Amino acid sequence: MVATNKSVFSAQQIADYQEQGYLILRNVLSRTEADDLRKLTRQELDRLSFPASLRYPAPGKYTISGNNFAEPGFASVVDHPTVVDAVECLLGEPAHLTAYVAYLRSPGDKGSGAHCDYKRWRPVGSSMNWLFAIIPLTDFSAGYGPLLVSPGSHKLLDVFDKSARIWDVSRPDAKQLPDFIDPDLQAGDLLLLHGGTWHKAPAGTTQEDRAGIFNKYCGISSPPAAGYYPYNRAAYEALSDQGKHLIPGPSDKPILTTRLLIEDAANGESRYLVQEAEGGTGLQLPGGVGWEEENAGWDVGARIGSLQSLAQEELGVEVPWMSYIDDVDEGEGRCRLYGHVDPELDSVSVGSEQSWLTEGELLGKLGESDPICHAVQSWKREGVIRGKGKAISQSKKQFE
């Protein structure tokens, strides 16, 4: 569906988006603005693009992403008022930026097959309420290579139980995909694509580059299950005053540790597993030094795989999924906190250095300003819609 209102959509337009899984605004950028961004993207490939092993003009998909939007000339497309207004209207609430991405496909690139970008293990794709904001910087025509969408395909990603504390979704059946259509995207248009909508990019036939902005935004009440991309202060400061709300918790400190809030909800009153910190300096949550998973690429920040390994090592328990809570300062870096709840976790063996405590007991021992108590309160906060995050190593079993 093509919209004509550039700021606030009508109830019918929103209903069309919810039914079709996409909406288009024409001419959000002028042809000159789009071409300037294309030239800037091409100019910065050698310095900023991923993967570093791919050197232009070799055929392939080049990616400028993450904190690189703080480089001069890129930031204005992230918090463009028309884009943000449209995004937040469709999400139904203020938004956070989960991905800044400028793609350039050089001649000879083979495109991509049909897929949807909901991925449990990716900071950019694991929210329960997110969308793409795609702006072609060249025409996405048959010559350059179109972007095809499958109207209504987002419905294949269905939530089992929306009354559940942590949402889970059904496995989409690609055999049921509606036919793909070409939305005839021109340079400067804005395609608002539901996070579950299937799409594909056939190879082009032109001898010129195909380029576009493929940003992602989530609703503030639906954090990515894998955690947010770690934006730094430079990225935050590159945004306008009106756009700074798009980045939650910017920090120049690296994510060094990761910890897990394990909730046992078996007997009516929840209990949480804590353990003695090294040197008997107090209580802490299970976990420790985390690491980025192999093949994470440019989409960094998830620590689920490392935290699963730490839980197995420290507690002897397999944690099949976890969901992001927050990032907090710990030592010289940041600690990424996740949560997990299971009515049968009271079977976890507790050593002398570990104990199950209720929220009241934690508050009595630590006080409400303690990071553990803060994590419990954040984990229990009403109105937050969480999904189940998994590790890259579980990617083929993400719906099991």
Image: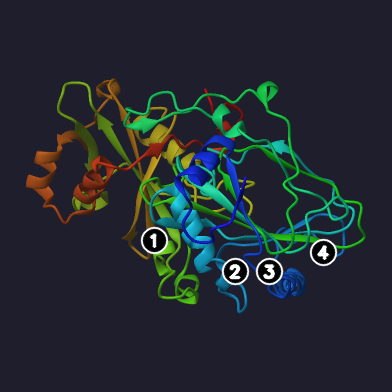
Tell me which residue sits at (42%, 36%) in the image.
387
Amino acid type assigned to the residue bearing label 3 in the image: Leu
Q: Earlier in the sequence, mark 3 or mark 4?
A: 3
Q: Which class describes the residues within 10 Å of circle 1: few (<14), some (14-19), or many (20+)?
A: some
Amino acid type assigned to the residue bearing label 4 in the image: Arg
Residue matched to label 1: 248
Q: Kindly identify which numbered label has been placed on residue 55.
A: 4
Residue matched to label 3: 48
Q: Is residue 269 left or right of residue 191?
A: left
Is 96 located above or below residue 389 in the figure?
Answer: below
Residue matched to label 2: 68
Tell me which residue sits at (70%, 21%) in the image.
175
- Dot 3 and dot 2 residues touching (CB under 8 Å): yes
Helix, strand, or loop for circle 1? loop
- Dot 4 and dot 1 residues touching (CB under 8 Å): no
Percent position of residue 169, x then y: 48, 28
- Give whichever of 155, 161 is nearer the camera: 155
Q: Which class describes the residues within 10 Å of circle 4: few (<14), some (14-19), or many (20+)?
A: some
Tell me which residue sits at (43%, 23%) in the image.
160
Helix, strand, or loop for circle 3? helix
Q: CA distance from mark 3 to mark 2?
A: 7 Å
Q: CA distance from mark 4 to mark 1?
A: 33 Å
Residue reaching furthest left? Answer: 364
Helix, strand, or loop for circle 4? loop
Q: Earlier in the sequence, mark 2 or mark 1?
A: 2
Q: Earlier in the sequence, mark 3 or mark 2?
A: 3
Q: CA distance from mark 4 to mark 2?
A: 18 Å
Q: CA distance from mark 3 to mark 4?
A: 11 Å
Helix, strand, or loop for circle 2? helix
- Give whichever of 119, 346 is nearer the camera: 119
Q: Earlier in the sequence, mark 4 or mark 2?
A: 4
